Image (cartoon, grey):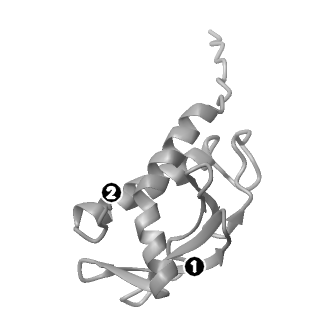
């Protein structure tokens, strides 16, 4: 008995990614402004989770901020701490992850399988992760919206 399994190719949804980028911009902008004005900041969540925020670039229409998890306990071999570089586009009011875990130039869609083992929708996933991270720090009272 043979079964025909048709693989569905991931279809990139630009409108969904732009909606997510607009939500992330609105949530991230006050935090980015604070980091830009006061220098690097550390956000502590609980006893064992800290994130350092640093402005990498600042221009009239864009700001790029690095979010980097800081280890508070001895790292496990092979464990890579979270690192995201987020670019805010002030004119378009969008924020997107431009680098994640050292991966630059995230593609909108990847063929699966691929040599680097990226998910088909990796770009959307890392931007969704940013949204969840922003919700976490907001729920802990560490992010105030203006």
- Image quadrant in which you'd find residue 75: bottom left
Q: Where is residue 141 in the image (x, y as percent from the top left)?
A: 22, 68
On-image quarter of the C terminus: bottom left
- Report the residue at 57% width, 51% height from top: 94
User: Which one is nearer the viewer's eye here, 92 or 64?
Assistant: 92
Relative to 3, does residue 34 appear above or below in the rendering?
Answer: below
Q: In this view, does 105 lie above or below 57?
A: above
Q: Mark 1 points at which residue?
A: 55
Q: In which quarter of the image is the N terminus?
A: top right
Quote the CA–CA distance across marks 2 and 1. 21 Å
The reply to whether discs 2 and 1 touch (Cβ–Cβ < 8 Å) is no
Residue bearing the label numbered 2: 135
Decide if residue 53 is in sight here.
no
Q: Which of marks 2 and 1 is nearer the N terminus?
A: 1
- Furthest residue toward top: 1
Q: Which of 92 and 125 is in front in this view?
A: 92
Tally the numbered discs. 2
Q: Position of residue 109 (x, y in %)?
A: 70, 40
Q: Pick whichever, 101 or 117, lies toward us.
A: 101
Tell me if mark 1 has few (under 14), some (14-19) or many (20+) residues whose alpha carbon lies within 10 angstroms of its own: many
């Amino acid at each position: 008995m043979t079964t025909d399994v048709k693989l569905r190719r991931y279809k990139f949804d630009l409108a969904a990614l732009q909606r997510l980028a607009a939500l992330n911009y609105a949530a991230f902008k006050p935090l980015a402004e604070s980091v830009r004005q006061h220098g690097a900041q550390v956000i502590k969540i609980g006893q064992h989770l800290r994130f350092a925020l640093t402005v990498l670039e600042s221009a009239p229409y864009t700001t790029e901020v690095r979010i980097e998890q800081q280890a508070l306990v001895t790292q496990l071999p092979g464990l890579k701490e979270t690192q995201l570089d987020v670019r805010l586009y002030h004119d378009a009011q969008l924020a997107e992850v431009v680098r994640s875990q050292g991966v630059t130039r995230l593609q909108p869609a990847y063929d699966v399988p691929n040599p680097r083992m990226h998910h088909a929708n990796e770009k959307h996933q890392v931007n969704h992760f940013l949204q969840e991270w922003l919700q976490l720090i907001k729920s802990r009272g560490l992010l105030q919206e203006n």
